[in-house]
């Protein structure tokens, strides 16, 4: 599992340590990956900064998106049980 942010590495490192993330928080300061998944929210951040729309993806080893959760609200994220349920469903479907 990884997270991607438009913030620079030093900010992501502090945020990751502060919140005790057990996964990588990557920096996409030029928003290349964020644009690839159509997640850029131009001017949506503090002082009109570009930010990424909140989103969660389950991507398989071939790069195929198996599940996604998108929102326009920066405070809304999928609950862990939603992601685990989606993982179980996509994992089960891939074995059929």
Image (cartoon, rainbow, N blue to C red):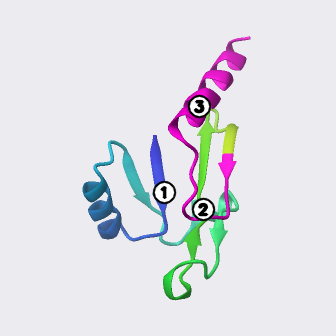
Q: Is 93 drawn above or below residue 86 in the view shown?
A: above
Whole-angstrom CA distance, mark 2 to mark 3, is 19 Å
Magenta-drawn stretch contains 91: yes
SS for callout 2: helix
The image quarter containing residue 58 is: top right
**Residue at left offset 27%, top offset 64%:** 14
Residue shown at 33% from the left, 69% from the top? 11
Q: Which mark is residue 34?
A: 2
Q: Please give left or right for residue 1 compared with residue 18 in the image.
A: right
Q: Crowdedness of circle 1 by 10 Å Cα count: few (<14), some, many (20+)? A: some
Q: Secondary structure at mark 1?
A: strand
Task: Compute the Cα span from label 2 to label 1.
Answer: 8 Å
Disc sitting over residue 83 in the figure: none
The magenta stretch is 69-96
Which residue corresponds to mark 1? Answer: 4
In the rendered image, which quarter contains the C terminus? top right
Q: Residues within 10 Å of mark 2 (few under 14, many from 20)?
A: some
Q: Earlier in the sequence, mark 2 or mark 3?
A: 2
Label 3 near label 2: C-beta < 8 Å?
Answer: no
Does the residue at mark 2 contact the one at mark 1 (Cβ under 8 Å)? yes
What residue do we see at 54% from left, 33% from top? 81
What kind of element bears circle 3?
A: loop
68 up-or-down from 89: above or below: below
């Amino acid at each position: 599992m990884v997270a991607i942010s438009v913030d620079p590495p030093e900010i992501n490192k502090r945020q990751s340590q502060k919140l005790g993330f057990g996964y990588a928080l990557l920096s996409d300061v030029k928003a290349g990956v964020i644009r690839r998944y159509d997640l850029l929210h131009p001017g949506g951040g503090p002082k009109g900064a570009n930010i990424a729309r909140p989103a969660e993806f389950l991507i398989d080893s071939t790069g195929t998106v198996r599940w996604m959760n998108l929102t326009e609200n920066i405070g809304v994220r999928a609950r862990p049980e939603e992601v685990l349920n989606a993982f179980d469903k996509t994992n089960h479907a891939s074995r059929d």
